[in-house]
Image (cartoon, helix red, strand yellow):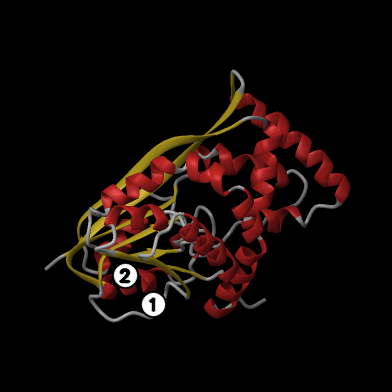
Amino acid sequence: MNSPSPEQIIESQRQDWNRVADGWEKWDRFFDEQMAFLNHRLVGDARLRAGLRVLDLGSGTGYPALLTAQTVGTSGGVIGIDLAEQMLEAARRKAAVLKLSNVTFRTGDVTTLPFEAASFDAVISRFCLMFLPEIPKAVAEIARVLKQDTWVAAAVWSAPEKNPYLKIPIDIIKQFIEIPPAEPSAPGIFRLAKSGELAGMFQQAGFADISDDEFLGDVGFPSADNYFSSLMDIAAPIQNLWTKLNPVQQKDAKQRILDATEQYRKGSIITLPIAVRIITARKPT
């Protein structure tokens, strides 16, 4: 069986993320609040300030692009790019509510950016690059569109064992069906979890002052049911696995997920650890 082409992978992902766009909008406020620490970390690591022109890769429903727009102010500007038009429609609605006129959202492929060379003062990305079929090509595009002596900051998921938030459902689904090991270079949630991998790609692309930092945090839920519902609404890769279970298996798997999640209860809150790998790099002069 032939492996899918990069174009086929991109189109499949476009469909996946459009499918969960309503779920992302449903849970927007919750995850904007829960992930605020990560959005602010990216803004800081990219050295953002008033007046800069910034590109956000994989904007989804608008974060961290919206926070970035507030940071750079009316003298600056932000462009957010994503495969899924329905996700970006939600981002535009949020921008309108916030009265942000300095941010625009465009549908596009991160590996072929539709921008001139040296046209941005910074590039940021949250949970995007690991899903790309050609990551070095995307890194080269980042280098091309950045001005000299400016920064990129990208967040990707770290190791599975440090991310119960994502690992619990995957492990339990594996109890019911066989999930073949992914090819090391295949797009996926943990594709760039290994220390030094994405950093090495930035080094190969000519970047300097590269840092590769594992950033620990957690996501709090009022109940295990709340966690399960949010996950099934927004996590396209896990949704794809879930549909392989029959209704009886799904009922059993859900209960096992709820039981496993209860291990992380702290008082009235379920607190699930996450580990994020943050890569920052400077395009030299």
Residue 74 in the image: state x and y as whole percent: 28, 61
Q: Is residue 32 above or below residue 226?
A: below
Of all residues shown, which one is farthest toward the top?
Answer: 267
Residue at image position (33%, 74%) is 141
Is residue 26 something one can see in this rendering? yes
Does the rendering let one see residue 187? no
- For badge 1, the amino acid type reads Leu
Q: Nearer the viewer, residue 100 or 143?
A: 100
Name the residue type under label 2: Ile
All told, the count of numbered labels is 2
Q: Is residue 140 left or right of residue 260?
A: left
**What whole-number distance in Å separates the C-alpha atoms at marks 2 and 1?**
8 Å
Which label sits on residue 226? none
Q: Secondary structure at mark 2?
A: helix
- Residue that label 1 marks: 113
Asked whether the residues under the numbered discs 2 and 1 touch, taking CB atoms below 8 Å apart as contact, a structural biologist would say: yes
Left or right, 157 with respect to 121, comes to right
Q: Residue at x 46, y 59 (%)?
A: 95
The tag earlier along the polypeptide, 2 or 1, is: 1
| Residue 142 image label | 2
